[in-house]
Amino acid sequence: MLHERINKMNKKERQIIEQAYFHLKNELGDAVRWNENHNAHDSQIDAFFKLNDKKLAVLFKNEVRPAQVSGLSEFAEAFTPLLVVANYITPTAKKVLQEHGINYVDRVGNIWLKIHPIYIHIDGIHNQPPSEDQKNRAFTKTGIKVVFQFLLNPKLINGTYREMAEIAGVSLGSIPKVMEGLKEEGFILKKTSDQWAIKDVDLLLQRWQNEYTKKLKPSLFVKRYRSNDNNFFNSWKRLNFSEDTFWGGEPAGDLLTKHLQPEKFVVYSRETHQNLMKNYQWFPDENGDIYVFEPFWENLPETNTPEHCVPPILAYADLMESGDGRCVEIAKLIYEQYL
């Protein structure tokens, strides 16, 4: 029976992959079949379909947004052809998936499948985006803080819930929800009876970056400033920051790669408004080039990154958010060198 073939999946994942299978079956009849040979070495894939004589690798995602597609594209190179099955895919993500040649089916039956000689494109079936209550708990504001620490230190995934909560600076009660959310999304898997491992670290990073810039970062914004130093664009590295202040964004990109002249200065700081003015000669300005955000972490592991520079993961997220071509190139360089 179909349920027996996929009984290792969680209930939500199983139901949506079943729905996708029957949507395809409705269009293709006997040309598509469920492949029972889903062996252990195929653990990165959630299921396999047979499309005529081709083995179609199925990857489940709860929600697909444009920022995730680059990671999915790399995944598609390892598993060809790939079919992304999702609860919900944003309209823009559908277009980007098509541009990258990635097949998809969503929960309600929107399909883009292009595997010669078959081409199916069904769009316009209304699919309600998940509500906040339905969305995965791994990517709430609290979950984003926890996942950040997992990306910085993957060994923390096997720490106690109390350790996770203390390091991430969140409540102990939120940790089980985050862990269950990551399991639901397939981002963590069991290695042994008591050991977990992060699966698809690259894809998790892309998802975290997207969720951080959309949900958490806007709530951290404090104020824009300008420097009283007319030579600030050349002298910014000489500022003697306190232990509570860090360069993010473009300055972090330059500190990490030495290949970017900052034009917009992102700063994460716990210093008071008065101290920022007193210590660095920065003054409030709605059009200023210095953007101050509140840090969202309690602890950072020791790294080899420059002093007063945010971790490469956060610098990458800030630079990718900008959409500026030169910043995106530096983000890719950080990814290659550090991530």
Image (cartoon, rainbow, N blue to C red):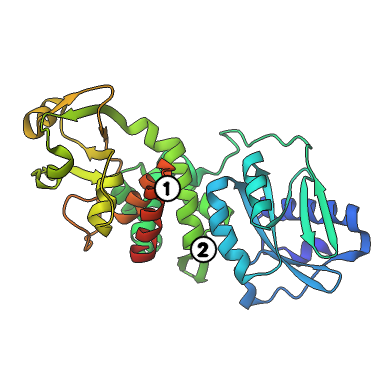
In x, y percent, where is residue 325?
A: 42, 47
In the image, what residue occupies the spot 26% across and 26% down? 223
Name the secondary structure under disc 2.
Answer: loop
Q: Is 245 left, or right, of 110 in this rendering?
A: left
The residue nearer to you, when weighing 131 against 281, is: 281
Amino acid tagged 2: Asp
In x, y percent, where is residue 80?
A: 68, 69
Q: Which of the marked residues, 1 or 2, is nearer the chain's N terminus?
A: 2
In the image, what residue occupies the spot 78% across and 37% down? 124
In the image, what residue occupies the spot 44% across and 43% down? 323
Check the image and report above or below for 199 versus 222.
below
Q: Residue 1 appears in which quarter of the rendering?
A: bottom right
Amino acid tagged 1: Gly
Q: How far is disc 1 from disc 2 in space, using C-alphas?
A: 26 Å
Name the secondary structure under disc 1.
Answer: helix
The residue nearer to you, when weighing 164 against 22, is: 22
Q: Residues within 10 Å of mark 1 (few under 14, many from 20)?
A: few
Q: Residue furthest right?
A: 29
Q: Is residue 168 visible?
A: yes
Q: Residues within 10 Å of mark 2 (few under 14, many from 20)?
A: some
What is the number of the mark on residue 200? 2
Q: Is 285 left, or right, of 130 in this rendering?
A: left
In x, y percent, where is residue 235?
A: 12, 43
Check the image and report above or below for 111 versus 153.
above
Q: Is 101 left, or right, of 243 in this rendering?
A: right
Quadrant, the C terminus: bottom left
Q: Which residue is mark 1?
A: 325
Disc nearest the viewer among 1 and 2: 1
Q: Is residue 310 visible?
A: no
In the image, what residue occupies the spot 34% across and 48% down? 165
The residue nearer to you, when weighing 149 against 207, is: 207
What is the number of the mark on residue 33? none
